[in-house]
């Protein structure tokens, strides 16, 4: 799974990325600091089944800390987007190409209104952050439109003449954008236009691209710089219909770096932290800890971890499943307890899990066994969050 961090320049994208992943990224208060995309790994949390099982797990593809399972998510921080990026302005073409495989976007918005469309600093409250959301929607829609416009009419007529499913032809044209046939079909059905796409003009095609953008590249808004943002800006962002999480990427990055240096005890996503030894902090650090502590007390969290978990568990509607080879001991062949944790779409079945683990398991699927109830389940059994599953396949 790949989550793209998007937004105009100088809104805190690279700070957010660094806070989320603790990966190195160039951070500066001027536009186009990021040119090459930064890749890193963030983690979403779930309760590890080993707690109820009563035996310590041995994580392989994830982490476990005191009963909390941390499942990795690939995160991509791309160059800032400016108006008319789809036409090649700024670093737009590179931005959009880097995002082809993203499953969802975290849109970092400067909720303080302190940066203009180009990412240049302006007075806090001067710029309307709602406009940033509108222009990003437009740019992604026009990007998809640019890929389809030369061939759309021809493909629509071909589908009508041959009886081929139109969504199949469009899917072939959109190969590489991580857009499924089902997403294309859903977007066709929800586009306010004639049911026959061969009769569409350019405006109908653009309407389809706008629907497809929201369907195939769902988005959550990180209302960043919330520590200095006018409250009405955040409320107006929430009224746009997207999930919105107020964030302070600067605070989260400072907390994670301090925790890594053993100056404080802090778990990402928690609503408090503990100073390990106040004598090791200089006056500026003491003041910063006090300020961040007050923010957490008033707001709960910095919002950074919450954004990633909301996009994974709510926007993309994922659940965590634990495949094992021994349904009684919950072990793999190496004797590791609950070694792997996989993210699956809610509604996935046992055979989907088999294919997720390995293509051969899916191709040779016979049945599965629920590790908690020890009941045999069929290929169409719908999985639940936290399930422990053994796959039985032909050898």
Image (cartoon, helix red, strand yellow):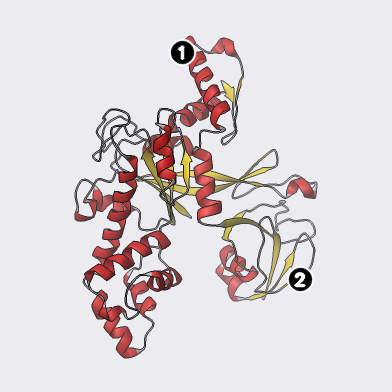
Q: Is residue 290 left or right of residue 384?
A: left
Would you identify the image quadrant in which residue 342 lies? bottom right
Q: Is residue 89 left or right of residue 181?
A: left
Q: For numbered disc 2, what is the local secondary structure? A: strand
**Place of residue 305 in the rendered image (x, y in percent of width and height, measured from the top left):** 52, 40
Asked if residue 336 shows in the view, the reply is: yes
Q: CA distance from mark 2 to mark 1?
A: 60 Å
Q: For numbered disc 1, what is the local secondary structure? A: helix
The residue at which mark 1 appears reads as: 284
Asked if residue 39 shows in the view, the reply is: no
**Place of residue 328 in the rendered image (x, y in percent of width and height, measured from the top left):** 80, 59
Residue 376 numbered tag: 2
- Quadrant for the C terminus, please: bottom right
Q: Is residue 277 left or right of residue 144?
A: right
Residue 23 numbered tag: none
Count of numbered marks: 2
Residue found 43% across the figure and 71% down from its top:
186
Residue found 40% across the figure and 43% down from its top:
237
Q: Nearer the viewer, residue 393 or 162?
A: 162
**Place of residue 172 in the rendered image (x, y in percent of width and height, measured from the top left):** 35, 73
Q: Nearer the viewer, residue 163 or 242?
A: 242
Asked if 227 appears above or below 155 in the picture, the reply is: above
Residue depth check, mark 2 versus mark 1: number of the one nearer the observer = 1
Residue found 61% across the figure and 15% down from its top:
277
């Amino acid at each position: 799974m790949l989550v793209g961090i998007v937004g105009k320049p100088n809104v805190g994208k690279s700070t957010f990325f660094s806070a989320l992943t603790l990966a190195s990224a160039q951070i500066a208060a001027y536009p186009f600091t990021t040119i090459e995309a930064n890749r890193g790994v963030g983690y979403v949390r779930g309760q590890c089944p080993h707690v109820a099982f009563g035996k310590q797990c041995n994580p392989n593809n994830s982490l476990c800390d005191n009963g909390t399972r941390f499942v990795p998510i690939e995160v991509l921080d791309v160059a800032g987007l400016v108006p008319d990026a789809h036409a090649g302005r700024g670093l737009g073409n590179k931005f959009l190409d880097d995002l082809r495989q993203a499953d969802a976007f975290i849109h970092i918005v400067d909720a303080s209104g302190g940066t203009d469309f180009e990412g240049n600093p302006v007075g806090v409250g001067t710029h309307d952050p709602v406009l940033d959301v509108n222009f990003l929607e437009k740019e992604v829609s026009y990007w998809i439109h640019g890929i389809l416009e030369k061939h759309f009419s021809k493909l629509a007529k071909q589908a009508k003449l041959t009886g081929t499913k139109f969504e199949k032809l469009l899917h072939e044209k959109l190969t590489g954008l991580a857009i499924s046939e089902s997403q294309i079909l859903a977007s066709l059905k929800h586009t306010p236009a004639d049911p026959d796409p061969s009769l569409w003009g350019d405006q109908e095609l653009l309407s389809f691209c706008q629907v497809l953008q929201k369907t195939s590249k769902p988005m959550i808004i990180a209302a960043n710089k919330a520590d200095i943002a006018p409250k009405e800006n955040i409320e107006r962002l929430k009224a746009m219909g997207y999930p919105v999480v107020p964030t302070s990427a600067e605070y989260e990055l400072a907390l994670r770096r301090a925790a890594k240096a053993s100056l404080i005890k802090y778990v990402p996503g928690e609503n408090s932290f503990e100073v390990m030894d106040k004598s090791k902090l200089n006056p500026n650090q003491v003041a910063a800890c006090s300020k961040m502590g007050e923010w957490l007390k008033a707001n709960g969290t910095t919002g950074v971890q919450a954004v990633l978990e909301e996009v994974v568990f709510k926007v993309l509607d994922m659940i965590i499943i634990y495949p094992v080879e021994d349904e009684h001991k919950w072990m793999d062949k190496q004797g590791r307890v609950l070694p792997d944790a996989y993210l699956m779409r809610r509604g996935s079945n046992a055979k989907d899990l088999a294919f997720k683990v390995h293509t051969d398991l899916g191709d040779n699927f016979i049945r599965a066994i629920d590790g908690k109830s020890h009941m045999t389940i069929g290929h169409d059994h719908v999985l639940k969050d936290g399930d422990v599953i053994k796959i039985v396949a032909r050898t």
